[in-house]
Amino acid sequence: MNRSIGSPSHRSITSVPVARGGGVSDFLQLDTGDAPKGGLADWLAREIRDAIADGRLPAGGRLPATRTLAADLRVSRGVVTEAYRRLTEDGHVAGRGRGGTVVVAVPHVPTPPPEAPAHLPAAAGAGLFTAPADDLGVFDALRAAPARIDLSPGLPDLAAFPRAAWLRAERSVLAGLTPSDFGYGDPRGTPALRTAVARWLSRNRGIRADPDDVMIVNGTAQALRLLVDVLHADGVREVAVEEPGSLGVRQHLRPLGTPPVPVDAHGVRVDALRATGARAVLLTPAHQFPTGVVLGGERRRELMEWARDGGLVIEDDYDAEHRYDRPAVPALRALLPEHVCYAGSVSKLLAPALRLGWLLAPPAHRDALLDAKRLTDLGTAALPQLVLAHLMESGDLERHLRLIRRHHRRRRDAMIAAIRTQLPGAVVHGAAAGLHLTITFQETFRFQETFRKGAYEDSDTALAAAALAEGVKVHPLSWHTQLPHPPGLVLGYAASGTAEIAEGVGVLGRLVR
């Protein structure tokens, strides 16, 4: 949240001091007179978040003791405790016992370039969203487009990245490395991370695997690309995909055919999969993208029969850890390891920039995948692997998961509430888990008259383009379909605060009638 230097809540700590008493503190020059009635905890949490975002409170900085700040502000200690609790759940601060409450996350607040207009011409967004599916730069273009609210799916809360825990782990790892550890290593990955991943999957996904079964890759994207090369060399010419299903996945599978297989309320239709004649299928069974359905028990049994007949299942364990209103479901790899190639990563759990994931292949493909990985890059960078292994083995990663689940649930609830109010005609799908919701419009929607001028049609791509023109990023559902489908949007909620979510959905509501 960028404000001018002269704005009252952004006065420098070195500015003219404010007299003590009367609800004023030297800490950040806080004045309870600026707070709305009945919203002291919200106001205090917001002021501290702003100070973290603009650098006045750097990572490692310590907040005042709750008793001290409460006395300065002349409020109850419970107000300060509640504000600190919300900041902790958001991942901005962490309690350090006798060390107090410390800033651990400094969110990057992107600012558009000076020449970027606050209100984009509608035609700019229209061209982006009508780009052909084989345009590999479409996601890069959307990420680069300026917007004040980003509701794109697939983004975790990057401000909640556990910087302090990562730094501690990195220092510990570096202190124990020998000179030889900086040389070329095993292209499968470091033994430490392969062991940690095997244990993590056993605890969290029901997969029994030996560390030698695990290959560390640069995210799920590299896992898919390696599989494409290996399967193509093995004579596979098509990999069936879910319908609707991820446009990004289809782009990664581009050298192969991707026949669509319909998904219903119980998951992928195995009868339709058999009808394609494809020898392999890529699925997101724990939380199907984008509908959010879970592959049901009967469908799992049918799928296992299909696999035993010679099929290969590529399991993208998308969003498996992020669940709120339902219990975990076991991974398909746990049921039939000799016919399931399992891919996972920490892109949604920690950050995509880490480029860390894992691939567990059936014995028939393991050697070929290792050769492909070796020829591609000689192995993933070792230091981040060792730091991640430390986080997994120390319990820090599971603590981080518990934390982000709480505030992801809160943001999901805020999005659902906003949709009910602002888009009452929309149907919500996939709310029980994940980092996104899909909404569909059962009736033909129309743009408000202001936005119906020009070349727009009443489609979800036109709606997404109009939203981008208003500074809100979303995905049109049609991006992720190959067959005709009711119009809809795919909306991510993990990377935005509740106020931003409400504002973004409000923009969508104003665009549609």
Image: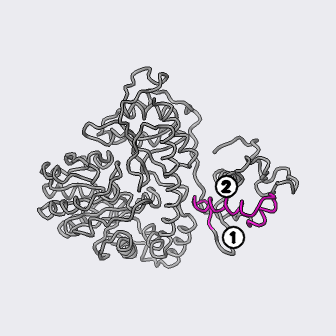
The residue beneath circle 1 is 100
Residue closer to the observer: 432 or 156: 432
Q: Where's residue 289, x and y in %?
A: 34, 50
Q: Residues within 10 Å of mark 2 (few under 14, many from 20)?
A: some
Q: Where's residue 456, x and y in %?
A: 39, 25
| Circle 1/circle 2 CB separation < 8 Å | no
Q: Amino acid at mark 1?
A: Gly
Q: Is residue 384 magenta?
A: no
Residue name at image x 79 percent, y 53 percent: 29
Q: How is the image coloured?
A: one colour
Most extreme residue toward the top is 453
Residue name at image x 41 percent, y 27 percent: 446
Q: Secondary structure at mark 2?
A: helix
**Is 165 drawn above or below residue 140 in the view shown?**
below
Residue name at image x 26 percent, y 40 percent: 482
Indicate left or right for 362 with 444 as reference: left
Q: Amino acid at mark 2?
A: Ala
Which one is in front in this view, the residue at disc 1 or the one at disc 2? 2
- Mark 1 → mark 2, Cα distance in angstroms: 17 Å
Indicate left or right for 261 with 218 as reference: left
**Is 247 drawn above or below residue 211 in the view shown?**
above
The residue beneath circle 2 is 45
Indicate left or right for 393 with 316 as reference: right
Q: Where's residue 311, x and y in %?
A: 15, 60
Residue closer to the observer: 219 or 454: 454
Magenta stretch in the rendered image? 65-94
Precedes in sequence: disc 1 or disc 2: 2
Quadrant (top left, top right, bottom left, bottom right) of the N terminus:
top right
